[in-house]
């Protein structure tokens, strides 16, 4: 394979035959694309609380097909590995560990770890220890690295259970020990199911409304229930740094547990029967208690019933006590919310939620802590004088945050922020945290009045990250620092109380993100890491933020990438657009820019960027906002606004002389795939489309999808108009569909792609369906990723880069399964 420049010179004259797409089995794309799957990206970083140690974990992004093919059980919305009592597909995995000392630059390689996957790293509050899990085929154990001795060791022989508690351990805030959920049934004989134990599966409704989204991997039988109890059961253990573990209380189905700030009590949530076949475990009946460190129940806070009848609406909640949390600035005080509207935000009441508190020793009646006008969203604690209370409402997407005095939370509130949660321009940033005297993580407050905020700094010019000092007494902010072009730099941590010494992450269009120490007082910048460019073959790619307008006046933007060595004298290019629609209630908010023109140009294997290697221009994330106007819901206008956004994107690229209007492809994943099918059905803007892991028939998601709160029976016309399956006869362009056979995502059943393909085939349309064995909503196996790149490359060769598409190939019955 020649280099990228030669590819670009040749690609426009390439004539692709149909034989490539008739190939059987897993395939490998051209070398420049294949290299992206194995590219080594910068490691994931975990900074110690004192800012002295940077833990760098090598990212394990790609699995083997054998890894995905291992047995997994699907129970109550969970995929689990029965061999080691862990979630079978954790989002974040690591394969190596390195420690870097901030002050000296010394690097320590941790080489004594067993073969396995590293996950869930957490620093102790005193920054002496870094804990993490090493997961092996038959067990998952807790390890700790000691920053003083520079040694890593397995802390205890106990085996962790992360089936229900995905992060199955927590540090005591005082750093003396860890509480972990242990797999008590590991090693016991597995449950078996035979014909003598099979019974009819019977469900009966009560006549009460119980709308539920289209969850997947739910319980389906009494045997499933028994397996859920067997694999979910855990036993909490107290593990000091000596490693001698002792049991806390009795085994249970622990949904969550958290340690009080004074390290003396545990807030425990345990799942109760009966279970449900309609909702995942997160909605099962749950008992909330406070335990002492020996496991004795000090108080029962709530016995929540099965939550299968929550009113319809994204801001609707269960009735009764909910959202339990420790007050981080106090030793042992519990806060919880309780709906005053029956759980339904559509009910007109002065306050939708009340907050209550109960303090150790938990003998008195709970006290009313605060009244919340809208739906309670969360609390951020600083000290007895300062906390941030946030409330929200879905109908107008509004979120409000107040500065409160926890001693009297309903008096003298100060409105800190009010905005649509889509409004990036008004985002004040996130508070910087520190550990208090107890070791709990709280908002950093200096001088009793100043907190520090770091944010993306979204603006008309793109994201310009910042650090602000907010004065609680005057309710005003002072900007201490902001990123400067041509770099994109953001604050990772503060090393002092004045906001003058910072740890930042800095990058540019061509420079990979790296860590720096920025001293504002001395105006110096010291580089801490030197991660190399992961895509050397793509160094010449150019990047431009493009602004344009839709026909209704909504301002849009997208990021245009051009292949290396391209200049306009070479004429227009074929273009690949990759997009994802979003819903808004405000045109101005929908128009906002949410990227930086100076961010590093990631190529990666996931999206459209690899095809720059074929001389294709990429228009990434051209905005496709769906805006509710004049009292209408966004989806009432979905098709019209979607096509108008796509038309505007095509027009601006043609006007700039970049795009050949007859050679533009549209692609997307998940809701982006839904977009692709709709655009092919309701416009003639694109020559072809690529739709991955999508949903195409909204009657299969009858109780809502994305931001749609109305059910099918309330908005049948909307569901029908938005479903490209209902309009498949209008699709006149070839469409490639790819889907993981094990997709657990709500709504995107693999059947969605299978039935859409059957419709297109039955109607005589050109389509290809690729079903990937063992893959979920996102694709993980190296073979799968290479094959997806190959499928997309061949599809673009055949349908975008040639003037005429050849006749359809013969059907192939291969692994991965392919239909044409």
Image: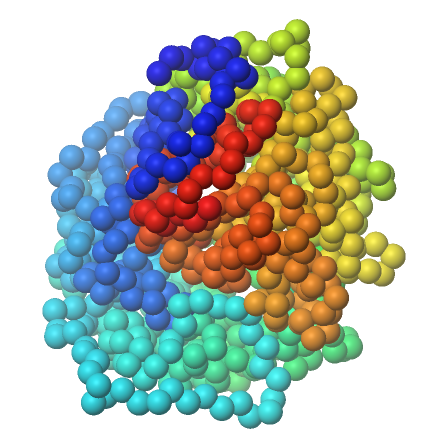
Residue 775 in the image: state x and y as whole percent: 36, 51
Q: Which quadrant of the rendered structure holds the N terminus? A: top left
Q: Quadrant of residue 648?
A: top right
Residue 423 in the image: state x and y as whole percent: 71, 46
Q: Give the total number of marks visible in the rendering.
A: 0
Q: Which residue occupies 63% across, 30% down?
A: 664
Q: Residue furthest top?
A: 569
- Viewer-proximal residue, 221 or 359? 221
Judge whether 16 appears above or below 743 on screen.
above
Left or right relative to 781: residue 727: right
Residue 484 in the image: state x and y as whole percent: 62, 21
Q: Quadrant of residue 253?
A: bottom left
Q: Which residue occupies 80% across, 46% down?
A: 587
Residue 545 in the image: state x and y as whole percent: 66, 25
Q: Which residue occupies 32% across, 47% down?
A: 814
Judge whether 255 appears above or below 483 on screen.
below
Q: Which residue occupies 57% across, 52% down?
A: 760
Left or right relative to 506: residue 199: left
**Residue 137 visible in this rendered orientation of the protein:** yes
**Residue 265 visible in this rendered orientation of the protein:** no
């Amino acid at each position: 394979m020649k280099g990228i420049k030669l590819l670009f010179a040749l690609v426009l004259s390439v004539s692709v035959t149909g034989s490539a797409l008739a190939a059987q089995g897993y395939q490998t794309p051209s070398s420049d694309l294949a290299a992206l799957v194995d590219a080594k990206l910068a490691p994931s970083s975990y900074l110690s609380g004192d800012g002295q140690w940077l833990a760098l974990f090598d990212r394990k992004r790609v699995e083997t097909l054998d890894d995905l093919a291992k047995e997994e059980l699907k129970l109550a919305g969970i995929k689990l590995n029965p061999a080691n009592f862990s979630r079978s597909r954790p989002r974040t995995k690591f394969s190596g560990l390195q420690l870097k000392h901030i002050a000296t630059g010394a690097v320590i390689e941790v080489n004594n770890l067993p073969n396995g996957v590293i996950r869930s790293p957490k620093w102790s509050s005193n920054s002496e220890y870094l804990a993490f899990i090493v997961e092996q085929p038959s067990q998952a154990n807790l390890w700790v690295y000691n920053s003083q001795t520079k040694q890593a060791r397995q802390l205890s022989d106990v085996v962790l259970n992360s089936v229900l508690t995905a992060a199955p351990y927590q540090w005591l805030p005082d750093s003396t020990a860890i509480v972990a959920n242990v797999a008590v049934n590991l090693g016991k004989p597995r449950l078996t199911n035979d014909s003598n134990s099979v019974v009819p599966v019977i469900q009966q409704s009560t006549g009460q409304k119980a709308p539920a989204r289209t969850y997947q991997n739910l319980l389906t039988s009494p045997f499933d229930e028994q397996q859920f109890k067997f694999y979910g059961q855990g036993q909490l253990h107290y593990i000091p740094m000596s490693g001698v573990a002792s049991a806390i209380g009795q085994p249970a189905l622990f949904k969550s547990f958290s340690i009080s700030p004074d390290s003396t009590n545990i807030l425990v949530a345990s799942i109760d029967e009966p279970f449900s076949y309609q909702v995942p475990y997160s909605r099962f009946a749950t008992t909330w208690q406070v335990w002492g460190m020996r496991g004795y129940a000090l108080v029962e806070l709530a016995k929540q019933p099965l939550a299968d009848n929550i009113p319809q609406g994204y801001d609707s909640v269960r009735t009764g006590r909910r959202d339990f949390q420790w007050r981080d600035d106090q030793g042992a005080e519990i806060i919880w919310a309780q709906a005053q509207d029956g759980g339904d935000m559509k009910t007109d009441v002065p306050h939708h939620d009340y907050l209550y508190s109960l303090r150790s020793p938990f003998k008195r009646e709970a006290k009313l802590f605060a009244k919340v006008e809208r739906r309670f969203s969360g609390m951020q604690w600083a000290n007895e004088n300062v906390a941030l209370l946030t409330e929200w409402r879905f109908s107008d997407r509004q979120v409000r945050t107040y500065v409160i005095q926890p001693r009297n939370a309903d008096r003298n509130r100060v409105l800190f922020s009010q905005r649509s949660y889509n409004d990036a321009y008004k985002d004040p940033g996130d508070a910087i945290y520190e550990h208090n005297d107890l070791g709990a993580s709280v908002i950093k407050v200096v001088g009793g009045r100043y907190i520090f905020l770091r944010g993306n700094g979204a603006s008309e010019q793109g994201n310009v990250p910042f650090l602000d000092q907010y004065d609680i007494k005057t309710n005003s902010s002072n900007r201490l620092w902001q990123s400067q072009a041509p770099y994109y730099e953001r604050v990772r941590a503060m090393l002092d109380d004045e906001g003058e010494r910072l740890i930042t992450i800095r990058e540019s269009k061509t420079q990979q993100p790296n860590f720096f120490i920025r001293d504002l007082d001395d105006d110096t910048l010291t580089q801490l890491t030197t991660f190399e460019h992961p895509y050397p073959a793509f160094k010449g790619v150019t990047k431009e933020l493009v602004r344009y307008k839709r026909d209704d006046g909504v301002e849009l933007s997208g990021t245009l990438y051009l292949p290396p060595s391209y200049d306009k004298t070479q004429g227009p290019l074929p273009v690949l657009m990759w997009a994802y629609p979003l819903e808004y209630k405000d045109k101005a908010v929908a128009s906002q820019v949410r990227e930086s023109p100076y961010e590093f140009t990631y190529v990666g294997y996931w999206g459209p960027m690899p095809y720059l290697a074929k001389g294709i221009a990429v228009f990434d994330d051209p905005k496709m906002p769906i805006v509710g106007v004049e009292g209408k819901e966004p989806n009432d206008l979905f098709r019209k606004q979607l096509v108008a956004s796509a038309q505007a994107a095509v027009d601006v690229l043609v006007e700039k002389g970049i795009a050949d209007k007859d050679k533009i492809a549209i692609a997307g994943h998940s809701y982006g795939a839904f977009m692709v099918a709709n655009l092919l059905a309701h416009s003639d803007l694109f020559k072809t489309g690529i739709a991955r892991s999508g949903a195409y028939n909204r009657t299969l998601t009858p109780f809502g999808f994305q931001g749609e709160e109305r059910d099918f029976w309330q908005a049948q016309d909307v569901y029908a108009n938005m479903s490209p399956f209902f309009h498949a006869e209008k699709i006149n362009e070839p469409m490639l569909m790819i889907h993981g056979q094990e997709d657990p995502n709500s709504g995107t059943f693999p059947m969605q792609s299978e039935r859409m393909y059957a419709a297109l085939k039955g109607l005589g349309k050109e389509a290809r369906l690729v079903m990937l064995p063992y893959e979920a909503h996102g694709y993980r196996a190296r073979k799968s990723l290479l094959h997806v790149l190959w499928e997309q490359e061949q599809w673009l060769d055949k349908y975008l880069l040639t003037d005429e598409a050849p006749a359809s190939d013969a059907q192939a019955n291969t692994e991965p399964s392919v239909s044409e």
